[in-house]
Image: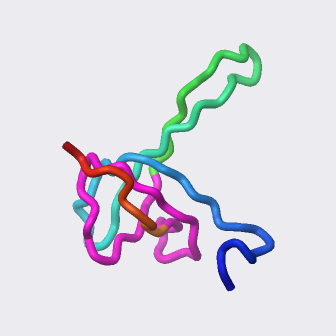
Amino acid sequence: MTDAARPNPRKEREGIVVSDKMASTLVVAVNERVAHPRYNKTVLRTKKLYVHDEKNEAKVGDRVRVQETRPLSKLKRWRLTEIVERAR
């Protein structure tokens, strides 16, 4: 079944790789701008996602796109789909 045909499509996020020390695993920081519930000021929230990278191709500083997937380990719930921009 393709992703477009799914009744509930998988979430996609874009973030920066902050760690690639583990074997075939990345830690990706995803920033999200949300309005504060009371004060309506825009707040930047950062979430760290554990991402499966089969070929160990992404490095620290790369901007990557990740997709939600089934649980792959205790913490890994995301899979690397593409490297949007390499670190300079």
Q: How is the image coloured?
A: rainbow
Residue 14 on image: x %, y %: 48, 50
Residue 65 on image: x %, y %: 46, 57
| Magenta portion: prevailing SS class | loop
Quadrant of the image containing the N terminus: bottom right
Q: Extreme right residue here?
A: 7
Say which residue appears at 55% left-offset and 75% top-offset.
71
Residue 73 on image: x %, y %: 46, 75
- Say whether residue 47 is left or right of residue 85: right
Residue 56 on image: x %, y %: 26, 70
- Say whether residue 41 is left or right of residue 78: right
- Say whether residue 67 is left or right of residue 18: right
Say which residue appears at 59% left-offset and 31% top-offset.
33
Pick whichever, 18 or 86, lies toward us: 86
Say which residue appears at 57% left-offset and 58% top-offset.
12
Q: Extreme bottom residue here?
A: 1
Say which residue appears at 47% left-offset and 69% top-offset.
79
Start-end of magenta stretch: 49-78
The stretch drawn in magenta includes residue 61 = yes
Image vertical order of residue 63 relative to residue 33, above or below? below
The stretch drawn in magenta includes residue 6 = no
- Say whether residue 72 is left or right of residue 21: right
Quadrant of the image containing the C terminus: top left
Please count the marks in the image: 0
Image vertical order of residue 81 relative to residue 45, above or below? below
Image vertical order of residue 64 relative to residue 74, above or below? above
